[in-house]
Image (spheres, rainbow, N blue to C red):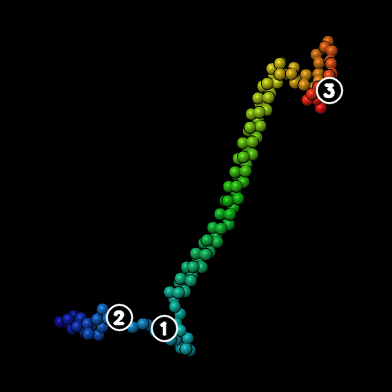
Amino acid sequence: MASARQSAARSRTRPDSAPRAPQRPKVVAGGGRAIRWDRVGRLALLVVLFGVVALYVGPSISFFHTYREAQTRRSEVRALQQENDRLRARRTALKDSRTLEREARRLGLVKPGERPFIVKGLPGDR
């Protein structure tokens, strides 16, 4: 029976559908307002969030620079591998006697017993 009285008293004081009156800020001694701990907590979380983001900025920049440098190094390695392949092919070609003779003649060398002739004034000569 006591519970029926309590529920009846609750329903008389304020029904659930009635609008609530806006709460006034609490006034503390000295005329100031009370500390709003929910706002302080949000501000603290915001400061922590910015701190965590700031801790990620440095390593992220370092990663970006390292990634760009790695790309540069990869392109250098590719160029050096192409040059290496070209030089290996040239070494193989120079082992052939015909290529060796052609290169010697390009340099102006002659075989023993041959007589060199120099012709000037041809088109294409320098």
Work out which residue is located at the far top of the displayed protein and give it: 113
The residue that mark 2 highlights is 19
- Residue 114 horizontal/vertical position (percent): 82, 12
Q: Which residue matches tag 3?
A: 121
Question: Which numbered dot is residue 25?
Answer: 1
- The residue depicted at 77 percent of the width and 21 percent of the height is 106
Residue 85 position (above or below residue 12): above
Mark 1 neighbour class, 10 Å CA radius: few under 14, some 14 to 19, many 20 or more:
few
Kindly identify the amino acid type of the residue bearing the numbered disc 2: Pro
Q: CA–CA distance between discs 1 and 2?
A: 18 Å
Q: CA distance from mark 1 to mark 3?
A: 107 Å
Q: Amino acid at mark 3?
A: Gly
Mark 1 or 3: in front is 3
Do we see residue 6 in this rendering?
Answer: no
* Residue 43 to residue 2: above or below: above
Residue 60's place in the image compared with 70, above or below, is: below
Q: Position of residue 48 (x, y in %)?
A: 50, 66
Q: Residue at x 20, y 81 (%)?
A: 7
| Relative side of 58 to 102, left or right | left
Measuring 51% from the left and 68% from the top, which residue is drawn there?
47
Query: Relative to 33, is 1 on the left or the right?
Result: left
Decide: marks 2, 3 in contact (CB < 8 A)? no
The local secondary structure at tag 3 comes to loop
Of marks 1 and 3, which one's residue comes earlier in the chain? 1
